[in-house]
Image (cartoon, helix red, strand yellow):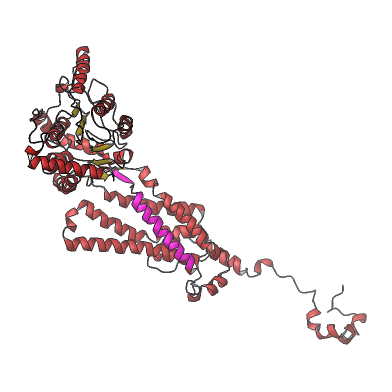
Amino acid sequence: MKDLNASSSTWADTLPSQWGPELAETQSEVEVPLNRPPQDPAQQPPAPEAASGAAAARLSLWGWMREGLRAALFLPPRTAAAAPTPWQLLVLSLVSAALLVAASRLHVEGPAQFNLRGWLTPMWSGLVLLWLAWWAMAPAQRAPADAVAASSPSLSTASAGMPAPTGGLAAWYVLTAWAPLAPLLVLYALMATAVHRPGLWDGTVLAIVFWVAYGVLMLWVLATLVVVSARFIQSRWRTAAFAVAMAAVIGVGMWQFQDQPWEPDVQAMVEASAETAAAADEAEAPEPVPLALTQAMFEEQQTLWQQQVDALVPERPGVVDVYGLVFAPYADENVFRRESTMVSSLLQERFDAQGRVLHLLNHAETADTHAWATPENLQRAVAALAARMDREHDLLVVYLTSHGARDHALAASHWPLQVAPATPEMLRAALDAAGIRHRVIAVSACFSGGWIEPLATDSTLIMTAADATHTSYGCGRLSELTFFGRAVFHEQLRQTHSFTEAFAKAVPLIQQREVEAGKADGFSNPQIRVGKQITPVLQALEQRLQTAQVEPEASGSSVASAPAPAPAVRAP
């Protein structure tokens, strides 16, 4: 092909009209000068997509933090199509999580330890929200920006000169981690004041101020999450669906998964308390004398066990009898000896259970009067009581008192005798095997709320001195009784025959006494659960005992007309 601009005898005489009418009309379009120097590709302007991509890739760590914090004020994020790198995503997530973990440390007064399980448990909700966000924003993230703006102009920021964020799930995750950070930290600080200065919010007005501030901060947190998500989703109905699902997920998490990243360091508190009160303990409450374990003692225990089982009074036809099992396996603290003796006497004095109570106790000074409190004897005692009682209609009251562990095992100590801890599963298996239907179970121990689920049935009332995550109080060497045993059994059940009424009246007393004693790890929060089928049984028992107390002559089996029980053994 020849150059059209070159001089040639052949082409110089050729007129445009000779090319035909079509080519003549488009002469300017056919001329292609071949002698123009080629343009350097490096000098060509970049494509719009490349330019925007290069700009989006330059968002720094501080840039992501800044945009997330701006979103807390409901300002549109200036991230456009930027997405965090994997390392940025990791660092930003860890920094925000570290700030919240550090702030939550203020929710535990005194020594605390990090609870990895408590930190990881709530993360299930984050995975659910990730999936929900991916579903909600998928159409908007795939569609062109102008199409999204045209379909949802009220949700798009393009009309305001600010392009909607299209960085995908990673960008959404970073922004939603940092947007609610400021209100969350303020909320944590508010809750910390209730822990460290509980008297600050006393009074009706101040309590209302506290809960109003709490509600405003929670709404702020939820609003930031919804607004940031809406900028990615770009759809009214998908945003509404995401908001409802998010609120449900957060609500379920706050209701069912209350684990916290910090928990009281009970061991450190015990050690500190022991060091502080060491001198007083030695002077006022010497340790119990260790058990002198001999063959004769083993043989005496077997004889004693058989004597106590044989002495159990059989059930009375037509009467809902109360049988009792009191279990105190920790020999190193006299408080458990005193408390178990008090409960055993109370059942006989107030609940018409004379001759129907087995008291298992570990203590060096009671080896010749009480059967040992071991898991084997606990199971044997349940079976022995079941053999004497009407298992379908009578009521068994079980009271356990000792130190409790975080795994909800009941501590046992009777050195040099090796005693295994008792567990709720062990007691449940024994009760089910014995076929005892109606049960009232009380557990006075730290973390005893963990006994409720394994023992709960429709025909069981169970109450505990604490919930599953808190310690109870009053189990030291200087304590006369535990706070729970004193308030519920020693005080309230001497005024009423209703277990539920006694518990309800005792809880405020326990809370007040814990505050006065300076309990450092928060309210023990005693728990109760009442099965539907046990309620009428307890109401009928309460009515019978109350009638017998008021009119002792109307019933020969009443408490008032019954012979007085043996005096309680009082530990030094």
Taking the image as drawn, is residue 66 in sight? Answer: no
Q: Looking at the image, which residue sits at the far right?
A: 10
Q: Looking at the image, which residue sits at the far top?
A: 295
Query: How many numbered circles are shown?
Result: 0
Magenta stretch encompasses residue 56:
no
Residue 139 vs 161, above or below: the answer is: above
Task: Please state if 521 lies on the left or on the right of 144 as rendered.
Answer: left
Image location (x, y in percent) of residue 134: 51, 58
Closest to the observer, 419 or 100: 419
Residue beneath the point at 24% across and 45% down: 535
Taking the image as drawn, is residue 404 in sight? Answer: yes
Image location (x, y in percent) of residue 12: 89, 83
Res 324 → quadrant: top left
Task: Please state if 37 lies on the left or on the right of 153 as rendered.
Answer: right
Q: Main secondary structure of the magenta part?
A: helix
Residue 70 vs 384, above or below: the answer is: below
Closest to the observer, 111 or 208: 208
Image location (x, y in percent) of residue 207: 20, 60
Magenta stretch encompasses residue 247:
yes
Q: If the image is split into quadrants, where does the N terminus sit?
A: bottom right
Closest to the observer, 62 or 275: 275
Res 27 → quadrant: bottom right
Residue beneath the point at 54% across and 70% down: 148
Image location (x, y in percent) of residue 236: 47, 69
Residue 133 vs 162, above or below: the answer is: above
Residue 111 vs 11, above or below: the answer is: above
Please give the range of residues in magenta: 237-264
Q: If the image is split into quadrants, where does the C terminus sit?
A: top left
Res 176 → quadrant: bottom left
Closest to the observer, 542 or 450: 542
